[in-house]
Image: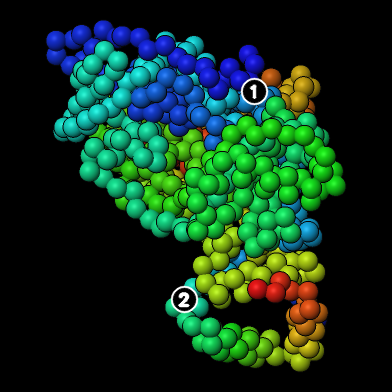
Amino acid sequence: MSLITDPNLDSPDDFYEALIAAHDGLAEPESHALNARLVLLLANHIGSLEVLREALAAARLDAQSAPAS
Amino acid sequence: MPDADFQSRTFAYARHADQDAATPARRPVVVVGAGPVGLALAIDLAQRGVPVVLLDDDDRLSTGSRAICFAKRTLEIFDRLGCGDRTVAKGVSWNVGKVFLRDELVYRFDLLPDPGHERPAFVNLQQYYVESHLVERARQLPLVDLRWKNEVVATQPRDDHVVLTIATPDGEHRLEAEWLVACDGSRSAVRRQMGLESKGRSFRDRFLIADVRMAHDAPAERWFWFDPAFHPNQSVLLHRQPDGVWRIDFQLGWDADPEHEKKPENILPRVKALLAHSSALRDAEFTLEWASVYTFSCQRMARFRHGRVLFAGDAAHGVSPFGARGANSGVQDADNLAWKLAAVVQGRAPDALLDTYAREREAAADENIRHSTRATDFITPKSAASRLFRDAVLTLARTQPFARTLVNSGRLSTATTLRDSPLSTPDADSFDGAMQPGAAAADARVTRADGRDDWLLRQLRDGFNAIVGADGATEQALRGLAVDGFALNVIAIAAAPPDAPSPDTLVDRDGAVARRYDLRRGGVVLLRPDAHVCARWRAATRSQVAVAMRHALALPEGVAR
């Protein structure tokens, strides 16, 4: 089992809208906290440490080149 | 005709005998607004034998290029209206879009990856050309009575007609319409006069459209930049039009001063910055053709039917420009309404059929507004969290294929599938593929008995059409079927050339009909007069098809005629 990076979401636009809506009305610290809880929930759902390490590495890879704002 | 003349072309006002009538003349159908939607509707009604008065408050075509992206479905409707070829010949065809983050290509999409369609995903063409093609087509039809400089100044609905007060250069007169269709745009006068509203969400952002003319051969693609170096922290969209004109759409932000931004001396540096950014365009000479600063709302009327008054196009609903869902959805409104209104006017279907226009196109408007709102929220994030995820998606899109599906620079207009349409007969068998009840018929290449290639959609005729997986017996059983004057045209499709070639059987040379419609031998896909699927069967009898046709006409079931 390795990290799926090809499209795998049932309905990408529905998911994205729901994700943004989940943050409605939250101040920045609350948004951060929501994201942290979300990462933990999804990590538990994935379960595999190997997959999670791959995801962490992929997310980290872009950390230096991400837009600054 | 030189292009400049198209823009300045005017149409002569002519005094009509109705203006001198002692009592107001009564007309079966009056359409207000000779834009793409009103013109398409008037042509469609006339082709179906309904006389139409088409009123326009002006005497010229659209000012500026305005709607420039005409979708495949619109082109297929224009084919039926007799001006698809001209529109495609003049337009710039394109299927490919590219999305850039800063200077880097992060995502490329092909809107028509599966070949075998006569029409491209889109043509880009200035709205005034499209209107001019439609006006010329309308003028060929004696049943279209196109009256320029006729401004509706009062609308009074009655139980079985509508009284209009119309201002012309010769003063005011009254006209009665048994049916009135308002296609008079986002600031609809008819809507306002009836005390109705189009409601929704306004976006606090401003955009600048600059149409520039330059001699250059960059590819015909849609290019979209997030946060480009030449226009930091905003988005830019570039599109090619005919006549060497390029549409550039700059996001400006809410604080921009529209009067300041509209001035050529302020536009030119923005365009130069874009051109300087591209090695291919750096030295291109250009002139400014047209510019406009705009804001937009995503909104719609609660109901598109109010008794004898129907609303279509921007009068009924509004979207952001991202996705080209304005004019294209309006033409789909006209396509949906024309056959229904013709059937009701001609006494061949009950009034209730018009309620299904409202229901189907209100649902379509919701879908368009949803897509348009999502694209706008992605392009111009409204919260810190939204911005954070937008930037994360764009960053990941460079290396992670999944993230590219989340990049939303506008989900481009396709035909709306009329899910849950009351006119559809639910499937009794199980099927794959997109051609479910409510879907607009997909095209495919077919081969005729004489060996020539043709297109599936070119085989459609007025009334209902049945695409049949040829087995001899089924097409035989269905031939000659008609319901209330609506004939059924049978299109027999064979997987391979038949042993005894029938002049009427078409060969599915690429297997695309079978694949797109999940059609097998003996199967039937029934299309209603606007070429949306309304029923399908693995095997069907003549009476089953007749019942489905009656159902699609909102007629009571089980009454044989």
Numbered label attached to residue B306: none
- The amino acid type, in three-letter code, at marker 1 is Asp
Tell which subunit mark 2 falls on: A
In the image, farthest residue toward the left: B22
* Label 1, residues with CA under 10 Å away: few <14, some 14-19, many ≥20: some
> Disc 1 versus disc 2: distance between alpha carbons?
48 Å
Q: Nearer the viewer, residue B56 or B258?
A: B258
Residue of label 1: B85
On the image, the x and y values in percent for residue B352 come to: 29, 39
Closer to the camera: disc 1 or disc 2? 2
Name the image quarter holding the C terminus of chain B.
Answer: top left
Residue at figure coordinates x 79%, y 48% from the top left? B276
- The amino acid type, in three-letter code, at marker 2 is Asp
Position of residue B551 in the picture relative to residue B515 (left or right): left
On the image, the x and y values in percent for residue B337 come to: 40, 34
Tell which subunit mark 1 falls on: B
Residue at figure coordinates x 67%, y 42% from the top left? B268
Q: Secondary structure at mark 2?
A: loop
In the image, farthest residue toward the front: B265
User: Which quadrant would residue B361 be assigned to in this image?
Assistant: top left
Does residue B288 appear in this view? yes
Residue at figure coordinates x 69%, y 29% from the top left? B242
Colouring method of the image: rainbow
Residue of label 2: A24
Position of residue A21 in the picture relative to residue B93 (left or right): left
Q: Is residue A26 above or below residue B82?
A: below
Does residue B123 appear in this view? no
Position of residue B281 in the picture relative to residue B417 (left or right): right
Q: Secondary structure at mark 1?
A: helix
